[in-house]
Amino acid sequence: MTIAIVGGGIAGLALGLNLHKRGIACQIYEAAPQIKELGVGITLLPHGMRELTALGLQDQLKAVAIEIRESSFFNRFGQLIYKEPRGKLAGYSVPELGIHRGRLHSILYEAACARLGKDKITLDRRCIGLDQNDGGVTLHFEEASTGARAESVHAELVIGCDGFNSVVRGHFYPDEQVAFTGINTWRGVTRRKRILDGRTYIRIGSIRTGKMVIYPIIDDVDGHGNQLINWVAELQCETTERNDWNKPGKLDDFYPVYQDRRFDWLDVGELIRNADSIFEYPMVDRDPVETWTFGRVTLAGDAAHPMYPRGSNGSAQALIDVRTVADLLSQTDDPVAALGAYEQARLKPTSDVVRANRENPPDFINDTVERLTGDKPFDQLDAIITQEQLRALSDQYKRIAGFGLQDVR
């Protein structure tokens, strides 16, 4: 059986590792001419860490990441709303990690090169189309670095792991549009002393008044004990103009909302001003589809279910996807049926997460408190909403996303 994986990101490399573990050969095609440590931060939740641990990567990841011990929610006045333990402190068998996305990608790439063989990963190959018949699938490529046409490839199966703007998905949904509801985001990393205990995932405010997500991703980044802090600013904008993935962020576009937020535990404006770099992104996803398997072609990760980057769930769902499809392919002599079974197993759960990230993400806690308090500082929050009620909101999202304590073994 010949399997072609389009895309060598987190999903594509993890799929290659899962297939190799089960004795199934594959070839990975990645558009980037070389692998670099790009991007900002990512959180590896317990259900994602379960998958990476099964691939034997937990120790390597922990060595370059920060173990998150607590998740804390604050209003925009810096008042604590709710907090809960995370990872092993919450009873999970695996830790929750804050990590630089580039480091995660490098660890997966190095593991794939070592186990599959470097010749099984072809770089500088951008997929530009495909043809399918009863005998298999032909993929067409160009060199990403030059735009020159590259040799086409024939495979028995194709799995598209080529991300949010998937060419493989676009072949089957050529007229599909992204869903944008006016929320824009800016992301950055800042070198500074620890915030709180240096092990906390922090959410401040809401998208209506200016939300921030903040967590550490590298310890002692400069040899002076400072951490590399990942932060995300999210704003519901009045215009319909969305940010551009390819542009650096401009302070003037969002900084005025945050510049006066000074708490006794954090100066938010200073955190933003001192960033090493700032990137802008639109908060977009795509509507769930009725199918992502078409004969000998299927989709995984963001190519299958692009979702709002909330709740740190995109990577975890991708890792579950690729382990599921690898399991099913290893259990049958009918690979086409295996792809159908994979879709049946994963389509509804991931569609539920897409909808939850839109309507009831983890920061729904912040939204709820802001609404109940009239967006004002509170004296006794329990008189308005109890910690048990807030915990129920948190647990509800975990259940939908598949990482309730009972779900992760």
Image (spheres, rainbow, N blue to C red):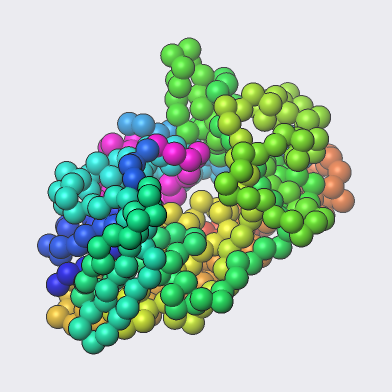
- Residue 230 left/right relative to 148: right
Question: Residue 388: x percent and y percent?
Answer: 65, 54
In the picture as drawn, the residue positioned furthest to the bottom comes out as 134
In the picture as drawn, the residue positioned furthest to the top comes out as 224
Q: Residue at x 15, y 64 (%)?
A: 24
Quarter of the image containing the N terminus? bottom left
Q: Residue at x 48, y 12 (%)?
A: 224
- Compared to residue 160, the image places residue 91 above or below, namely above
Visible residue check, residue 232 = no
- Compared to residue 379, the image places residue 319 above or below, namely below
Quarter of the image containing the C terminus? bottom left
Give 359 or 102, whichever is nearer the viewer: 102
Q: Which residues are magenta?
A: 37-62
Q: How many marks?
A: 0
Give 246 or 355, whichever is nearer the viewer: 246
Question: Residue 115: x percent and y percent?
Answer: 16, 48
Question: Residue 206: x percent and y percent?
Answer: 73, 49
Question: Residue 340: x percent and y percent?
Answer: 32, 81
- Compared to residue 212, the image places residue 401 above or below, namely below
In the picture, residue 99 is in which quadrant?
A: top left
In the picture, residue 60 is in which quadrant?
A: top left
Q: Judge whether residue 45 is colored magenta.
A: yes
In the picture as drawn, the residue positioned furthest to the left comes out as 23
Visible residue check, residue 223 = yes
Q: Residue at x 58, y 31 (%)?
A: 277
Q: Judge whether residue 392 is colored magenta.
A: no
In the picture, residue 80 is in which quadrant?
A: top right
Give 205 or 397, whichever is nearer the viewer: 205
Q: Residue at x 26, y 57 (%)?
A: 28
- Residue 268 left/right relative to 159: right
